[in-house]
Image (cartoon, rainbow, N blue to C red):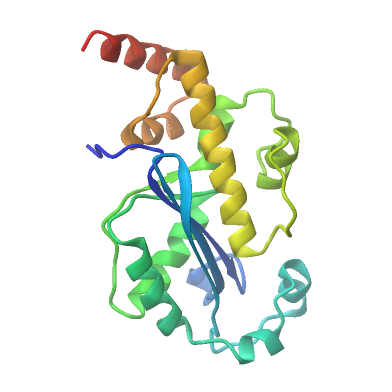
Amino acid sequence: MNLKHADTLVVLDFETTGLSPDNGDRAIEIGAVRIVDGKITEQFQALMNPGIRVNSFIEGYTGITNTMLDGAASCSEVMAQFCDFIGDDNLLAHNASFDQKFLDNELSHISRTYKGEFTCSLLVSRRINLDAPSHSLGNLVNQLELSEEGSFHRALFDAQMTAKLWLHMLAQINETYGIERAPFSLMQQIACTPKKQVAKILQNYSIQNATL
């Protein structure tokens, strides 16, 4: 069981040449923030040259051009630095299965790995923000009035907004269930629990820990 708190982790986001490393797609930007005890303490951002051309759709979608990538460090160099940045921390992303695939793929090229575990703010949001018409990051940020100046589909801004969404949801859980510092393992459990059972799990956790 992962005994670390959910308010201490690394939030990450990739921009990529396409949807899947299985199709040969590579990362072109990594953005991340470190949260420690509910506070953002550090950030990491870098473009990376994947050694392949980015198509016009991705250029328009992200604003990251081939010219920008021509002068960027290689994926191997950036990912080695990012692996050092992660350290032993747990990891969070919005639609984490996407980012985890690219993280695993990019680190496989340099024979590196990480010790922390993943969870997904999108899956947790589907179980916590039941009235949200959409659980896309942009929609949630606007609905919950978390927005700041910046551009979605750039890695650092998306990571920053995911961090704000995560801390907001932890605060919601604390307000509703009295769970001041939810463990990371509890949030992992919520992410894969049917919606109708989430309230019971949180209530039971709150009761059990109130008696300890």
Q: Position of residue 38 (x, y in %)?
A: 45, 39
Residue found at x 32% / y 53%: 89
Quarter residue 79 falls in: bottom left
Foreground residue among 194 and 120: 120
Q: On the rendered image, what quadrant is the N terminus found in?
A: top left
Count of numbered tags: 0
Residue 18 vs 182, above or below: the answer is: below
Q: Nearer the viewer, residue 165 or 153?
A: 165
Which image quarter: residue 136? top right
Indicate left or right for 128 with 104 as reference. right
Residue located 60% across and 63% down the image: 155
Instruction: Answer with left or right where residue 46 lies relative to residue 140.
Output: left
Q: Position of residue 145 (x, y in %)?
A: 73, 36
Residue placed at 65% from the left, 38% from the top? 135
Could you say where residue 100 lies in the image, as x and y percent from the top left? 44, 58
> Of residues 198 and 30, which is closer to you in this image?
30
What residue is rendered at 54% in x and 80% in y?
48
Q: Dividing the picture into quarters, in which one does residue 18 lie?
A: bottom right
Judge from the rendering whether residue 133 lies leftward or rightward of residue 181; answer left or right: right
The C terminus, quarter of image: top left
Residue 33: percent from left, percent from top: 49, 56
